[in-house]
Every structure is written in C-alpha cells, then in structure tokens.
Amino acid sequence: MLVLVLLAPVLSFFIVFNTIPTLWLLGLSFYNYSLTSGMPPEFVGFRNFFAILASKNAIWFDLSRTFTFVLCGVTLQTILGGLLGFLFWGSKNMPGRRIALTMLFAPMVLTPVATGTFFRFIYDPTFGILNYIARAGFGAGSIDFLGDPNLAFWAVLAVDCWMWTPFMTLMTLAALGSVPTAELEAAEIDRVPMWRRLPLVIWHHGKFILMLGILLRTIDSFKTLDLIIPMTKGGPGQNTRLVALELNKQAFESFNMGWSSAYAVLLLLISIAMTSVFIFVLNLRRRRESGS
C-alpha cells in the first residue's frame, strides 16, 4: 500500500502529461482538422500518413537533412567529448582543473534560443566577431555564414557541437569513472598498451554509460528546433530545415492539426526505431555470451 501511495504522484503526472496527450495525438492523426477552417474534424483514416509519405518535400528532404545533421553532429560530439574526457581523466592533479571543467560545461546549461541568437550576431557579415577576425587577421572579405547555402548548415552544426560536446565529455568522464581501479592498475603492471586497454578494460565497463549518452544526444539532436529558429529559420532556402521545423510550421503557424499529428506520429515511430537499434547493439555482446 505504501508503495502505491509513493508512486501515485509520479504515475498521475506521467498519465496526465504523457500518456493522454500521446493517445490524443494518435487519434487526431486520423482526422482532417484545421483550427482555422471552422469545420468539424473529418475522419480520413490513414490519408494523412499517405499524403506525408507521398510528398517529397513534406518529409523525405527534411529527414535526409535531419539524419545528416544528427550523424555528423553526434559523431563529432562523441569524438571531441571522448578526447576531452580522456584529457581531464588523465590530469587529475592539473592546476585549475575544476575551473576548466566549469567553463567547459557552461555551454551545456545555456538555452538553445539564447545560444542561437548569440551566434547569429557572431556570424553576422557586417559586425560579427568572426568576420572582424577574418578581415583583420587574414585580409579576407565578409563571409555570410548563415546566408551562404554552402555554409549555413555547417555553421549551425558547429554551434550544436559547441553546445553539446561538453555533454559527451561528461558522459565520457562518467564512463571512465565506472572502470574499476584494480583492473586499470593490473593492466598497467602487466604493461598492457593503451590501445589494448581501451577495448578490453575501459570499453567493457564504460560502454553502457557512453552508449546511453550517444542515445540521448541522438534523440535530442533529432528534434532540434530552438537552435534553428533564431539562427536561420530553416534558410537560406531549405538548407537548414529539419523535421522539427516543418512540424512546428504546420502545427503552430498553419494550425493544420490532423496533418501535423500524423507527422509527429511518424517521427515518434522513427525515434522508437532508433532507440531499439541502440538497445540491440548495446545488448548484442551479452546475447552472444549467453548463447555461447
């Protein structure tokens, strides 16, 4: 009885703010319903889903651009975060280590809207600090980072990496902290080279935490929105238009609730599929060991 009393607030919060909205979203995806039409909802079955999948501009272009953003961003953040994690892990007696870690983790706690606005001014071709450095130090002309179709996507990706590499550094430090000291000392006594310690000792104990960090970053990067809006609003053209931006446009600008609900359901299914792949890869070695 006590367990039910203690769990009741959490379960109530989960049901009210998670389960009910999700079921409502799923039901609304089968209707043709717009808040601005003045017409009652019309049941159309799977027509919204078929219309989305049949339209190249509705989801396929946005998905390809989003997957590129996620793959490049998470890969760079994992590599840089891992290198920084090993750097701080191996320098526990370094003077100013705590201050350096505090400054390193600072971008992670900033709101994406503020970060996007801040970097929009940094990238500005007229008075931005990057263009000032380029003109003063290298004699280059003005570069429109957010207005050039060839640079805008990578400029936004660089900001995302600047903001979330500290998270992967934190996860790397947590993964390294889970490695037993006795095994590390034994490997050092046996003079096992680092390239052998990494898969046999460090990865064996820290893979769950590191893979969890990659999973969280993948899901969060897949729904990037508040960083895009203040920087480019999806432009120039459609070069930085991700799936979350199109969903926001249809739901909160066009008020096409039926279509946007179906779009959100498809994105939810994609997120569940990505999560399932991560969990399968994480448990693959355990299944092999149990099978053998």
Image: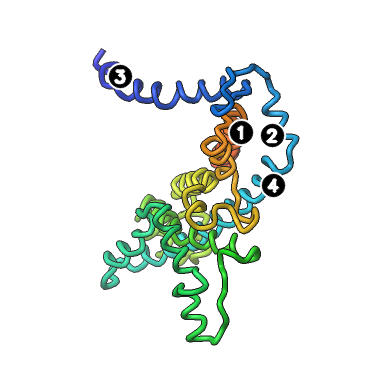
Between discs 4 and 1, the one toward the N terminus:
4
* Residue 109 visible somewhere in the drawing: yes
Q: Is residue 167 above or below residue 84?
A: above
For the residue marked with disc 2, what is the amino acid?
Ile
Between discs 3 and 4, the one toward the N terminus:
3
For the point 68% across and 19% down, the residue is 44
Image location (x, y in percent) of residue 134: 51, 81
The quadrant the N terminus occupies is top left
For the point 58% across and 17% down, the residue is 40
Which label sits on residue 52?
2
Between discs 1 and 2, the one toward the N terminus:
2
The quadrant the C terminus occupies is top right
Mark 1 in CB contact with mark 2 (< 8 angstroms): yes
Mark 3 in CB contact with mark 1 (< 8 angstroms): no
Q: Nearer the viewer, residue 163 or 183?
A: 163
The residue furthest front is: 38
Query: Is 133 placed left or right of 149 in the picture?
Result: left
For the residue marked with disc 3, what is the amino acid?
Ala
Gap in angstroms between the C-alphas marked 4 and 1: 14 Å
